[in-house]
Each structure stands twice: as structure tokens, then as C-alpha cells.
Amino acid sequence: MNITKTQVDALNAIVTVAITKEDYSDKVEKVLADYRKNAAISGFRKGAVPMSLIQKQYGKAVLLEEVNKVLQTSLNNYLTAEKLDILGNPLPVIKETIDWDAENFSFDFELGLAPQFSVDLTAKNNVTKFNVIADDKMLNDQVERIQKQYGKLISQAEVKADFEVRGTFANEEKGINAPANFALDIFADKNVAKSFIGKKVGDVVTIGTKGLFDDDHKLMDYLKVSHDEVHGLDINVDFTIEEINAVEKAELNQELFDKLFGPGVVSSVEDVKAKIKEDAEVQFAQQADQKFLNDVTDFLIESTKFDLPAAFLKKWIQTAGENPLSAEQAEEEYAKAEKGLRFQLIEGKVMAENNLQITFEDLKAHTAELIKKQMAQFGQLNPSDEEINGIVARVMSNQDEVKRLSEQVMGEKMLGLYKEKVSAKTKEVNYDQFIKEMYGE
């Protein structure tokens, strides 16, 4: 056997696998001998069928199968031994005819090669690392929300300015059917609030969505529409009133504090605000980290320039799935996948150059931490190590879960590396400002 590589250009090559009779003949003879032992052909005792008959009936099929096995094994071994960094899989060069009566065969395969490039994490960029704070307005709003949540609802006959209403937003054309409960001060347009005044249970109020809230993203919460739909959404929705309530706010006393945070944890409104601020800013930091990770990813994809073997990859996409694709379909799929492929290559380069690896202990510790947090949400604050380790073992026996958790661990490692090496500016914002920054508004 002889395997050679012809470099077409920096991103494409042809590998030729030349197979001789010595590479496959013994295997073919062994398979045919096994066939002969078990063949049941009329007129012959089992095991006594002439080899010439076995050869005539099965020889060509066995030859094809054994040559293909030799071909695949030798090609895979060659790619590994030569440490060729390929994209997709080798594509066989289709020949018009193959003379299977010959003793020696030659097969060509197209290869798409990974590009050579460098990644500069310290390059000048426009990336911002946000520090999101819970400001006084948010804290005051949260305290009031708590008072209303734990207050007393008193049913009313008709709507007044400071009452709450419960009902359902509906628009048949857009498929909107969204239950909601709110006070009238949520609306940016005061005329909308006024349209509710005096209404009774069962009444329907029709309102326009354009400019309904001070932030269009609230449409996502109240109407249950997607982010792509909220911008410029200009439709009418019907709100059917199902309940009208006055809210008698709960007193800010020790009984409420203990109910919220446990006995004696906080003892004043200032303590409550401090606790809310602490918890909120932990959540904000996680969201800010995710935005930072996404923004650095976009920056690296934009700034790290390299070519891909596009023609090869489009050809490979045509044959890679269960059903073959047309050239036009493959073109569309390639356009969708190109950005992701570029980032995979960039991420792999960053991981290799900075020796980012996931150990079993990393994965185990990350899984244990997640389990502890989940258990704490259900009131299990002090689980034993034995209990945690048992759950970790069960989770890590699932390969899909291991893959998902591995991606999370690597994401954390990449985030830590980016924080250390990417020269980003820092900007302090409140949560509303951060939401606008996150959606590029």
C-alpha cells in the first residue's frame, strides 16, 4: 500500500490511497472460506461447495467490502499519523468506472484543511465590561412590590387609578393570549390608564401597543411576544378584565422581614434593601459576564481574519446529512454555519495557546456546585458530601449531561481568560440601561 498527498493550495489537498492485492487478498480468502463452511447450496453437502462456485457467487461483493475496509482504515491511520487538521470528512473523488477485475486499485480523496492563523486577545477593541448596579429607584420599587405582594387584596366593583386589574391580553391575528396582573401606572401613555377608569369585571379595553410602555421590551413580559416582534409592534390588543382589586400594602415590620429572609436575618428597611441589592447584583453580574463573553466572541470573529476551504465545505455539506442536498441548499447551510465554524476554530486556537483544559475534577466540582444551588432552592441547605457525590455520579453517567456541563466549565475558563487578557473598558450602569445596551438600543 502507498499513500501520498498532493497539496492543491493552502486549504485543499488530494490524498491518494494505492491498494495492492497483498493488502486485501488474505482477508478476502478468509471470508470466502467462512462462507464455504456455512453455505447451503442445493446439490452439495454443507462445507463441500466448490470454492470456484463460492468465488463466482460471493467473490465480487466480498472483494468490494474488504477493499473498502482496508481503504477506510488506512486513510484514517494516515490522517492521524500525519496530524492533518482537516475540516469535515474526506470526500472520495468519484471515478466513472472502477475495474474490480484488476488486482491493484487507486482511490483519491479531497481534503479541506484548517487554516493557519493567530488570535490576538490584546488587540484594540470596542468591547465594554458592564458593572450593573441596583440603584435606589430599583430598590424602592422592589420594596413596594414586596409590600404589594404580601399585602391584602380587596375586591372592587370598578377600576380606580390606584387599583390593580387582572385579566388577559388577546390578539387573534398575532396569536396573543397572555394573562396579566398590573397596576395602571405601568403604562407610559397616561390616556391608556385613563381608559381603564370606571370599567367593571367583564369589560374589554382595547389599547394600541405602539408606545404603550416606556420600554418596548415590557411587551415581551406582558404580551408574551418574542424580542424580534416587540420593536415597532403596532397592533391593537383587547384586555378582558377578570378581577379588580385595591391593594392594602403589607407593613414593613419584623414579621414581614422574617417571612422574607428568615428569623432575625434583617431588622430594618435598610437591611432589606441591602439584601435585595446583594442578591440582584449577583444576578446582574452573571448577565453582564454573559454579554461580555458574547461581545468578545463577536470581536474575535470580526477581527481574526482567515480563509476557509469554502468550495470543499459546501460540497461536503451536500453529502454529510441523511438526505443529500442540492448545491443551492448547501450554499444556504454553509452561510448559516460559517460564523459558528469560524468561532470553533478560534476557540480551539485560544484553548490550545493558553493551555485551557477540562479535568475530571473541574467537571466534578462544577456539577457539585450546581447541585448544591438547586437543593438550596428547595430548602436543603446542608446536604452531606455522600449525598452530593451520589447525585454527581448519576449526572456524570449521562453523556449528554457531561457534554453540556463541559461546555459550561470551558465557558467559565474562557471568560476568566478574557477578563485577564482582553483590554475592555468598564462602564457602570443600572439594570434598565444595561438592558438597552444588551439589545443595542
Image (cartoon, grey):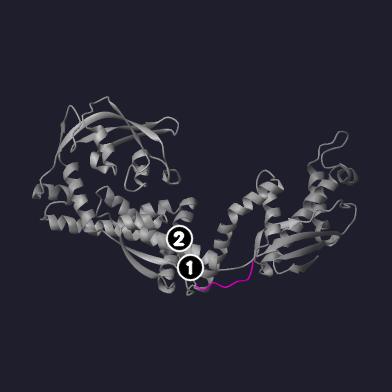
Which is nearer the eye, 407 or 134?
134
* Residue 385 can be seen in this image: no
Q: Which quadrant would the N terminus be assigned to in this image?
A: bottom right
Which is nearer the eye, 311 or 86?
311
Q: How many marks?
A: 2
Q: Amino acid at mark 2?
A: Asn
Kindly report the secondary structure that dominates the magenta region of the rendered protein: loop
* Marked residue nearer the N-terminal end (1 or 2): 2
Residue located at (18% from left, 47% from top): 144
Q: Amino acid at mark 1?
A: Gln
221 vs 72: above or below: above
Instruction: Locate residue 439 relative to residue 259 in the image: left or right.
Output: right
Determine which residue is flagged by label 1.
Answer: 357
User: Is residue 246 in the magenta section?
Assistant: no
Which is nearer the eye, 151 or 184?
184
Position in image of residue 264 (x %, y %): 11, 54
Position in image of residue 122 (x %, y %): 47, 75
Q: Which residue is the extreme one toward the front?
A: 191
* Residue 86 can be seen in this image: yes
* Residue 273 in which image quadrant: bottom left
Which is nearer the eye, 235 or 72?
235
Determine which residue is flagged by label 2.
Answer: 294
Residue located at (66% from left, 69% from top): 83
Position in image of residue 188 (x %, y %): 29, 44
CA gap, disc 1 to disc 2?
A: 20 Å
Q: Residues within 10 Å of mark 2 (few under 14, many from 20)?
A: some
Q: Are marks 1 and 2 in contact (CB under 8 Å)?
A: no
User: Is residue 119 in the magenta section?
Assistant: yes
**In this picture, which residue range is highlighted in magenta?**
114-120
Please identify, in this view, whether the residue under mark 1 or under mark 2 is nearer the observer.
2
